[in-house]
Image (spheres, rainbow, N blue to C red):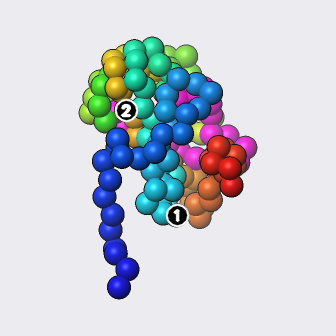
């Protein structure tokens, strides 16, 4: 019988470096999750960019809503130009795909978990994820 669950510590997930400062840790791929997108972003230093500036308008994401959780450290989000202070334990929900967002580390070793999917539609892996994982 196949194992029905799996565990991993954030620091065990392989980091895929991006063009911005934060290291992307592809959670969805690690666990074989097919129902929604989920990723972690870790910044080693204060001021590291954790999330690229983006929206989720239909451009391969099909209008995802996203929920971010600051798992450790301290982050600063810019959401449609508004600064949001987000210490560890903070949730930031973006329900409108047109909202432009980015995030930066305010403390060393800051980690953000991002979960997203398009409402009412079957989940599809985004073009962004395929492009960055080479598949």
Q: Residue at x 33, y 18 (%)?
A: 107
Residue drawn at x 62%, y 59% is: 124
Residue 21 location (% of width, % of height): 53, 23
Is residue 40 depicted above or below 27 in this figure? above
| Residues drawn in magenta | 51-70
Using a 10 Å C-alpha cutoff, classify the residue at mark 1 as few (fewer than 14 neighbours), some (14 to 19) or many (20 or more). Answer: few
Let me know if residue 74 is in the magenta part.
no
User: Disc 1 marks which residue?
Assistant: 34
The x and y percentages for residue 12 are 36, 46
> Count the marks: how many?
2
SS under mark 1: loop
Along the viewing direction, whichever of 95 and 13 lies nearer the viewer: 13
Q: Residue furthest left?
A: 89
Instruction: Please state which of residues 17 and 90 is positioned toward the viewer in this rendering.
Output: 17
* Label disc, if present, on residue 68 of the rendered structure: none
Q: Is residue 113 left or right of residue 100?
A: left
Residue 91 in sight from this viewpoint: no
Res. 19 in view: yes
Marks 2/1 in contact by CB < 8 Å: the verdict is no
**Residue located at (42% from left, 26% from top):** 43
Task: Say which of 49 and 117 sits in front.
Answer: 49
Q: Residues within 10 Å of mark 2 (few under 14, many from 20)?
A: many
Q: Quadrant of the C terminus?
A: bottom right
Task: Answer with mark 2 or mark 1, whichever residue precedes in sequence.
Answer: 1
User: Could you tell me how far apart the alpha carbons at marks 2 and 1 are, in whole angstroms?
Assistant: 23 Å
Give x and y (percent) for residue 69. Answer: 36, 37
Residue 111, which numbered label? 2
Q: List x then y, in percent, for residue 131.
A: 69, 46
Label 2 or label 1, whichever lies nearer to me, is 2
């Amino acid at each position: 019988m196949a194992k029905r669950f799996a565990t991993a510590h954030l620091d065990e997930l392989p980091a895929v470096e991006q063009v911005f400062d934060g290291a992307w840790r592809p959670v969805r791929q690690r666990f074989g999750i097919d129902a929604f997108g989920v990723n972690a972003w870790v910044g080693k230093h204060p001021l590291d960019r954790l999330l690229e500036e983006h929206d989720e308008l239909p451009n391969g994401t099909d209008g995802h809503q996203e929920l971010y959780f600051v798992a450790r450290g301290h982050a600063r989000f810019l959401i449609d130009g508004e600064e949001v202070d987000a210490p560890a334990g903070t949730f930031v929900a973006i329900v409108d795909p047109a909202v432009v967002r980015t995030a930066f580390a305010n403390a060393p070793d800051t980690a953000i978990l991002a979960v997203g999917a398009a409402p009412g539609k079957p989940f599809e892996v985004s073009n962004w994820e395929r492009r960055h994982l080479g598949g």
